Image: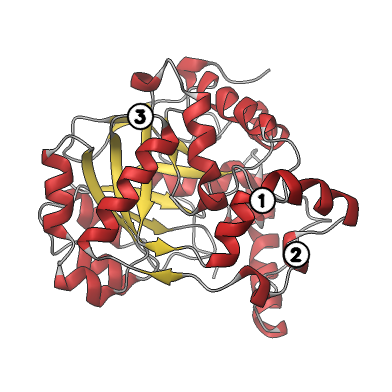
Amino acid sequence: MTRGVLQIPTRRFGRTDLRVSEFGLGCARIGGVFKTNPEGFVTLLSRAFDAGITFFDTADIYSQGESEKLLGRAFRGRRDRVVLASKAGYVLPSQRRFANWAKPVLRPAIRLLKLSRDRVPAAVRGTLAQDFSPAHLVRAVEGSLRRLNTDYLDLLQLHSPPASVIRAGAWLAALESLRQDGKIRYYGVSCDTVDAAEAVLQHARVSSLQLPLNLLDRSTAAIPPRAGQLGIAVIARECLANGLLVRPASEAQPDSRECDAEAAVRMARVRRYRDLARASGCTLPQLALQFAADVEGVSAALIGVSRTEQLESLLTAGLRPEGNRSASVPDLA
């Protein structure tokens, strides 16, 4: 039995007037040239909404803009019932812009050749550049609004800027202008490092901070409580460690970017957390999501799925163990 609309609690989003579901949907894998049936994503988004998820986090570059388009389709006619957060700051290389234009042709060819994302050479994918200039940010927001089929973004986030860019603050005036024009309601920063997150805390007008946080990587765990004291909402991402904490033991694989020794240590920790979850009467995904959602200061913990069956599996088990709302999860490093 899946969880109903009222079974995912909402939380206040920092000092804003927004309320969001404590678990949101990360939309990085919504759409894309390697997916043969875009309609399946609309079904996935609608199912998430029906389950009580109201916070959806995307970016202008996700699936070359298709992620935003699919969100716009899924929530046409019920825009005021969801909180849409997007990001800006990356610039797609020409190869990816072409792929977006040519998707109707590329999708059948990819299916015929049985190509996967990890088999495409980096030179073919191209290299992402960043641009946080006021002019680019304004253009990016206008593009997101068109693709999302909406007049406003609930939240615009700078997409992984270096700490030096955050500290300089040249982007503030542009985002304030967009907010005053009604094109964005609030703005924040999506960070990749503790240094960048520390820089965000120095800007009083920022409404949110997004950062990676999971059982295997607690390097950012001290940031959310401090952000909460400042009224800055925190969005936790990679809560399932890019799928490592949700796969069955027989399918769990280490990150290919790690050396053998690092991978061995990481997989040993996964096994220990799986044993801890079993001893606690829950699943490893439940334990992982409970940890991320219950870190003080976190407003929303993102779930990254790309198929409806993945979401259904999480919903059927329950997104957190019953009766364990405030239980702390020990660090098994």
Q: Is residue 136 above or below residue 13?
A: below
Above or below: residue 269 compared with residue 106: below
Residue at (68%, 84%) from the top-left corner? 259
- Residue 215 versus residue 150: which sits nearer the camera? 150
Lower sequence index among marks 1 and 2 = 1
The secondary structure type at the circle numbered 1 is: loop
Instruction: State the residue position of label 2.
Output: 253
Q: From where the camera sits, is residue 239 visible?
A: no
Q: Residue 228 location, x and y as percent?
A: 21, 49
Q: Earlier in the sequence, mark 1 or mark 3?
A: 1
Residue at x-position 33% and y-position 68%: 131
Mark pair 1, 2: CA separation:
33 Å
Q: Secondary structure at mark 3?
A: loop
Callout 3 amino acid: Thr
Q: Residue at x 31, y 73 (%)?
A: 162
Query: Which comes sooner in the sequence, label 3 or label 2?
Result: 3
Q: Determine which residue is flagged by label 3.
A: 150
- Tell me which corner region of the image, top left, top right, bottom left or bottom right, holds residue 172: bottom left
Left/right placement of residue 251 relative to residue 167 reads: right
Distance (Cα) linking label 3 and label 2? 40 Å
For residue 230, side relative to residue 89 (left or right): left
Q: Looking at the image, is 318 positioned above or below residue 90?
A: above
Residue corresponding to mark 1: 102
- Which image quadrant: the C terminus? bottom right
Is the residue 146 above or below the residue 268 in the image?
above
Residue 231 at x, y percent in the picture: 16, 46
Across and down, in percent, residue 82 comes to 39, 26
